Amino acid sequence: MLQEVGRAVKERLGADRFAVPKSREWAYGWPMRAHPIDRPADLDVVRESYDRVADNYADMVVTTGIGDIRRDPWLKASIDAFADTVRGLGPVLDVGCGPGTVTAYLAERGLDVSGVDLSPRMIENARRLHPECRFAVASATELDLGEASLGGVLGWWSLFNLPRDVLPQVLALFAHALKPGGHLITATHVGDEDAVRTEAYGGVPVRWTTHKWRPEQLVNLIEQAGLNPVAELRLPPTEYSGPGLVVMAKRPE
Ligand SMILES: C[S@@+](CC[C@H](N)C(=O)[O-])C[C@H]1O[C@@H](n2cnc3c(N)ncnc32)[C@H](O)[C@@H]1O
């Protein structure tokens, strides 16, 4: 049975490159890590919340362009710089890909990219909108990524729900999974507080915490994970969102 699931995942994602263990527990069709990251206490509640907003979120991106990097020249420039940097280095994984907007953008630019997301409904939308791309359901905290298996990894507006003590563990996993010279790009919300959301994307009831980070705090965490920051972009608040931050970082050669 496990071998069958393993084959299915390999077919879906197109390669052996994410270690598929012969016997191990599975979570949402993805092999669990040999050395688990602490499971966030609210993971199920966060997943259910994103499942509830997934259709509205995908609809928002498609119909208004909000959340689509093509609409924001600075976000687009960041992703373009990331794409140009990691092209040819190896597979790229978009962690917390949502409806797959950035995954598909990178695939269009010739990158060997896959997307994973905690929310099965987000992944259904990603597959519907971008049937040419590879997607799987998985939490950032439950990925089994081989050492030096990736040219690039994204945590694009998708790591802010991780508790403050869990984010460093996920960044360390990303650093371990990147090849020397490979790059991480992450975007997140800036601030000091933990903001509890009770509704989102058109009044849908949700329950998640947005852990905001001060730029220097996040950059320190990325450095502590063993990556060298190469660029930082600070974004002022807009009518849709508070202040944000993009950081790109490299695993040393
Ligand atoms: C604001 S959306 C961003 C989606 C996408 N990156 C984009 O830019 O359109 C946040 C996404 O992070 C996902 N997410 C939250 N916690 C996650 C986790 N622990 N592992 C994987 N994905 C997660 C959510 O399901 C949701 O799809």
Image (spheres, helix red, strand yellow):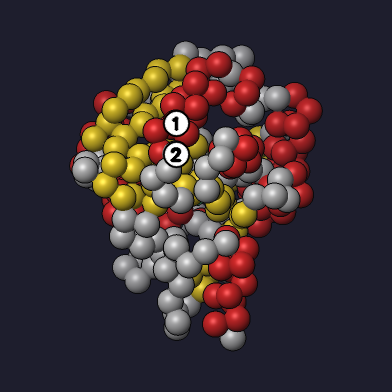
181 or 221, which is in the foreground? 181
Identified by mark 1, the residue type is Asp
Q: Percent position (x, y) of residue 61?
A: 70, 31
50 or 8, which is in the foreground? 8
Q: Percent position (x, y) of residue 52?
A: 71, 48
54 or 70, which is in the foreground? 70
Q: Percent position (x, y) of residue 71?
A: 64, 20
**Residue at image mark 2:** 87
Mark 1, residues whose alpha carbon is within 10 Å: few (<14), some, or many (≥20)? few
Circles 2 and 1 in contact, beta carbons < 8 Å: yes
Residue 164 visible in the snapshot: no
Residue ID at (55%, 51%):
114
> For disc 2, does the CB lie below 8 Å from ligand 1?
no
Q: Would residue 87 be found to the left or right of residue 11 on screen?
A: left
- Secondary element at image label 2: loop
- Secondary element at image label 1: helix
Quarter of the rendering containing residue 118: bottom right
Q: Determine whether 126 is above or below 23 in the image.
A: above
Identified by mark 2, the residue type is Arg
**Residue at image mark 1:** 84
Q: Percent position (x, y) of residue 8?
A: 62, 72
